[in-house]
Image (cartoon, helix red, strand yellow):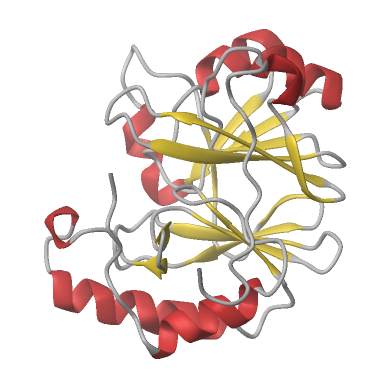
Amino acid sequence: MPPGMNTVVADPTKADQVLAEVIPGILEWSGRHPNHGSIVHSHYLTEQRVAIDPIGIDGIVAALERAGGVEQVVLTNRHHLRGAEEIIAASGAVLRCPRTGLHAFEGADTPTAVGYGWEEEVAENVTAHEVGSLSPDEGALHIAVGPGALAFADTIVADERGLGFVPDSLMDDPEGTKRGIVAAIRPLLDLDFDVLLMAHGAPIPVGGKQVLAAFADSPRTASLS
């Protein structure tokens, strides 16, 4: 495992161990995605009462309530609804999605979502930044908690070797998309953060900026299962 790739993983099989602390103020949980079956990761901001890209697993609604409750569910892109509907129904939380992805919530069978824009503060000390390239609604959330954290949608993922792109099969123009991702990551490195949070990969609580910078200098494609 590359330097800085210390990870935190919750045990989704035990209700009392659903949430794990990444750093004070940021909790994490994981579970299998109902569509593709891969383990995905979600995060909860205790002060803001925000659930980011929440996956539904046994005990998560009660665990979030014990942690302080959910006022907002924030998606880093339009595809990450996951288990949000159960959490919203139980908590009355507002669903937030990048404005460029709101078309995914226009159908009668979809929940109501409120759009947010790039460079907008979606919650206290949580600012959305545009990444794009992979899709127009692809973003990253800068979270000014502790040493700072950066939460990505699908721009970067992690496997046993470290950070990587999603497979080429998920890109319309793989080489152009990869160049665009690297170009979008570089200005994000100017933000203050040490923690790296991913929707597809366990969090990196220490040294996340260095790991992300190393990826930008030597990008690779991850192997997802």
The answer to which of 199 and 181 lies nearer the viewer is: 199
Q: Give coordinates of residue 40: x percent, y percent.
A: 46, 39
Q: Give coordinates of residue 92: x percent, y percent.
A: 69, 15
Does 16 sit left or right of 37 as displayed?
Answer: right
Q: Residue at x 68, y 75 (%)?
A: 207
Residue at the front extreme? 1
Residue at the top extreme? 90
Q: Residue at x 43, y 78 (%)?
A: 184
Residue 144, quarter of picture: bottom right
Residue at the bottom extreme? 217
Q: Residue at x 80, y 23 (%)?
A: 69
Residue 90, quarter of picture: top right
Quadrant in which the C terminus appears = top left
Relative vertical location of residue 56 with respect to residue 201 in this rendering, above or below = above
Relative vertical location of residue 115 with respect to residue 156 in this rendering, above or below = above
The answer to which of 42 and 191 lies nearer the viewer is: 42
Q: Give coordinates of residue 150: x percent, y percent.
A: 63, 63
